[in-house]
Image (cartoon, coloured by chain):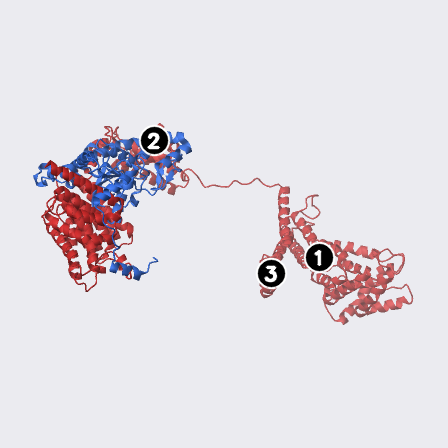
Chain colours: A blue, B red
Amino acid sequence: MAYDPRLSSAGTATAPSPPPPPPPPPEAMGGTTTPTTQPQPTSTPNEANNNTVAESESSSSSYKLRFCTVCASNQNRSMEAHLRLSTASSPFPVISFGTGSLVRLPGPSITQPNVYNFNTTSYSQMYDELLSKDERLYRNNGLLNMLERNRNLKWGPERFQDWVPGQPRVEHVSKGDKGALGTEGGVVDVIITCEERCWDAVVDDLMNKGSPLNRPVHVFNVDIKDNHEEALVGGKAILDLANRLNEAASQERKASGADGWENGVGEARRNFDARVPDILAEWQEKWPHLPALWTLAWL
Amino acid sequence: MAQSTDHLVDQIAQLNAARNLVLGDAAFYPQIVNGVLPLIGANTRLELRRWGSEFLAETFASPALASTQKEQLAPNVLQTLREILELPEKDPMVLKHIVQNAASLYPLVFRHIINHPAEATAWENMTAIKQDILRRWDSFPFPVKICCIKFVQRVVHVQTHGPIADPRRPDQNETSLAIVPRNHAILSLPNLEAEASGLLDRLLSVFQEESSDPLLVNATLNCLAVLIRTRPSVGNKIINAIMNFYPARQVRAPITPSVRVGVKSMERTARAVMINILKRNPNHPLAGKMQQYIDRLMQSRIEVADEASRKRGLPTEPTDGLDNTKRAKLDAETPALIKVPPLPPGPISYSQLFTLTEDRELSNFDVKQLPTDIVLKIVVPLLGRVDQSMMQQSIDAIRMRYQTIQKQQAAQPPAAPAEAEDDDDYEPEYQPMDIPEPAAEQAEAVSAEVADLQPDLVSLGPFVLPQPPPLTEDEAADIGRSAVGRVFGMLTSTGVAPNPAKGKSQQQLGFARLAGSTFDRDAWVTLLTRLATRAPAGLEPGSGKVEKGKAPISDSIRETLYRYILEDFRGRVNIGIMWLNEEWYNDRMQMEFTAQHRREEDEEVTVPLHYDHWVLRLLDGFLPYLDSRDTKIFIRFLSEIPEVTIPITKRVASLAKDPERVNLCIQSLLYLIMFRPPAREMCLNALEDVYDTCMLLSSPAQTTPTLTIPPHTSDEESRPLAGKLLAKWRPKKTEEQQQQQQPDGQQTPSQTPQSQPQQQQQQQTTLASRPITSSESNTPLTNGTDESNPAPPPLQQQPQSQPDATPTTT
């Protein structure tokens, strides 16, 4: 607001790019920075050791879709799914969010919920607060167990509407968030919500964001009741869906791999995106009590 | 091969390390991008091309990298991308990322060329890429097609007119046709606009096709929201295109689960777009239509996509073999007839009127015992199942009963005797046993309950308030007294002040006025006086027959009136006058009435007369309080009372005993002498008495009530005044007096001429009649000549004789 419009316009008109620093070779840069960041084995330069080569090869061969799980408060259902996806036998990159305006946890009565802000309150803080408030109550209703689980997964609840897709999430990897590996770029391939309300909110918010990345994203909803038992079942169902989707995506990559996708045959030749409705329909047959919904949106 | 694979793996690892670097710090992007470009070019291995295209797409989409830096990086990258694309590239992954990247790059390059028209190469590359993508759009594999949608949307977005936020700061504006100078060297506005329009049509064609893939439809829908929002020029066109699209129409048999998923997703996505627009702009001109579209979408979804769930719902309904509806269907062929029992004789209640059952238990059941909600739960389903013909029959039967009763009531107002014969007509011969009668009965029981709330017209006669027990006479008198007391209390307390305009209005009314019609204090007084006098006329027992302790109501009113006037006789003298006039008039009327109705055998019929009694009492009441200043009031009283009697004149004359009131006395008498001719003689006699008495008073032996005042003063005061008057009216007397004074002891006796009917004002006539009277009254006065025997004897005699004379018994 306080800029001089003439100055700023003049600046862009001439566009005098600041003198770039002497370009160091990428390898050298990578070598120098790895000790500090140390995000993942693949980030270590090739020269460091040969073990990483094998690892990176295996990880590249087993392609992983990147997931995002969403519920209202980023506490129960989305975090259960987060746990499932990030601790599966072949773990998926996963991030999770809530679409509510605030994080709401049950309190001593229905009119006295425990309310926290998104993005600024950690699961540990909530855990400590509830522990000091009434350990017996929150132990019995499972809140402390849930927070215990959550704080081992990531730092704190994040709000979907505040998420900037494409914003690097390297720091989450360094913090050791579960499922952070592979989500450094801040993008996902699949969003799974746990309630229709959340699905509506996600689709609406993506439209509002204006899809700056021009990147397609499949948005699913798996309707799960907000309690611990249903969340467990729902988490299992979401992992099932993720496995089915990932299998299709891997097949596509293989088929169109080195040999070219023309060489593939049958189902494998069909691309991943087109198979999504079929996959969901199959999945729904298996999980009839978890009504599902899907669309293709843009990040 | 292994070597190359190892090498490739190394390369990929290096590239990943570089990517992590820029993700950690976006400042390294320019170096890294320029560094990797040669490694991922057109002729490198597929893995590298894939990695490179993805990395570039990520780079130009990254919110971490400033758009100015992206603009600078763009030209080199464009060259590489074009080369890869024109390879021709066949790998969908690479193509997908290239198209994605092209979508990100297009606005950047467009903006760059606006500001740098000289750098045509970049724009040329961009245009080439665009043409290649558009040409191959339809033939691309699916994932690329999806990305093409997004690319085209970007192109349309850029090549239409967008909003200008601030004309002074073009760098702040969104990239659109609006910021393209009209005379741009390379960019031709009309061409760009036409191209955008064509592309938009192609984009929207997905909604018009017979069978569209849900993937493409959803991808299109989800990217259109931003166009509608930021490009009003094409917004309505897009909305209309969407509103003509019904996913349910796309359904082709067989409906597989995946088709259902697709239809549902399209409906929900279309709805989400509409809601997104409506939420941002609730006053959108198409808002109403959009809402309708949303509603219709939801409806069609229920019809088509959720058909299966509805089918599943049906068998869950309980199928009851004894269901009433099924039984009703079975009975349909045999028209059931209701048995209508006759009404009981005598007056009937509403519940009897509406009762069609003969079951005693059932008709005795009180429906009111059931809570309302339960009754509702029972009645509503029952009403739904009631057989139409049965219901009609029941209603007809009740109607006939009711009309019969009505007729009977009209004919003979007291209750109907018996209607058994009328109702026998409805007795049907056929009585089916299995009719579901309880339904109708229950319903009627409820209506009977409602009817019971209304007054029972049939059994109740007109209500007559019982007569109160008769009052005893004492009670009646007490109540009468208390009523009178209340009226007096009102007179005194509230001060129903005579309104100031009253005097005038009364004058205007003149003789036409009615007493007591104004409802002010005077009216109440009038009422009271008449109540005391005329009201009980003829009701009172004969005179002298008044039982002790049982004063009639009228006397108590008189008593109260008397006290009321005495309380403030100066202010209430007019009330007294009014009252006394009423009394006198009443006395006359009573006498007249009695005279007319007198029968021969009644020797002595007496009429109780009240005037004389009360006028004297009143006079006696206030005389002691009169002082010399009350002349006017007193004269008014004397002049307006209907009749002046001798006792009255005596009372007036007695005033002369008080030297202070001699003037009052003499003036009052003078007034009466002058203006009340019938009383003139009486007054003159009284005056004479005063004159004489004054002389007598000088003697020390006299006993008069006026003890406080020394006799000589009254003597001195009254005598000259009286003498003066007498000299005028009875000159002879005064002469006599003067003569007698010298011989000392000779007094002319004065005799009041009772029967003298002189009306003349002229002195001559009066004087002419005088000799007779004076001669008559000689004797008593001779008695009075004795000094030791003063005036009292004649004074006492006359009051006694006069009242006795006045109660005239005719």
Where does the image place residue B667, in percent across and percent down from the top left?
A: 76, 65
On the same chain: label 3 and label 2? no
Under mark 2, the amino acid is Asn
When the figure is inspected, residue B650 is found, relative to residue A98, above or below; the finding is below
On the same chain: label 2 and label 1? no
Q: Which residue is mark 1?
A: B569
Q: Nearer the viewer, residue B123 or A148?
A: B123
Relative side of B5 to A66, left or right:
left
Q: Which residue is mark 3?
A: B499
When the figure is inspected, residue A269 is found, relative to residue B685, above or below; the finding is above
Under mark 3, the amino acid is Asn
Total marks drawn? Answer: 3
Where does the image place residue B508, in percent across and percent down from the top left?
A: 58, 66
Q: Nearer the viewer, residue B730 or A109?
A: A109
Where does the image place residue B805, in percent across and percent down from the top left?
A: 74, 55
Camera-near label (1 vs 3) is 3
Question: Based on the displayed image, in which of its 4 quarters is residue A239 positioned?
Answer: top left
Neighbours of disc 1 within 10 Å: few (<14), some (14-19), many (20+): many
Q: CA distance from mark 3 to mark 2?
A: 94 Å
Q: Which corner quadrant holds the N terminus of chain A?
A: bottom left
Q: Earlier in the sequence, mark 1 or mark 3?
A: 3
Could you tell me which chain the residue with mark 2 belongs to? Answer: A
Q: CA distance from mark 2 to mark 1?
A: 105 Å
Neighbours of disc 3 within 10 Å: few (<14), some (14-19), many (20+): few
Where does the image place residue B500, in percent across and percent down from the top left?
A: 61, 62
Question: Which numbered marker is on residue A145?
Answer: 2
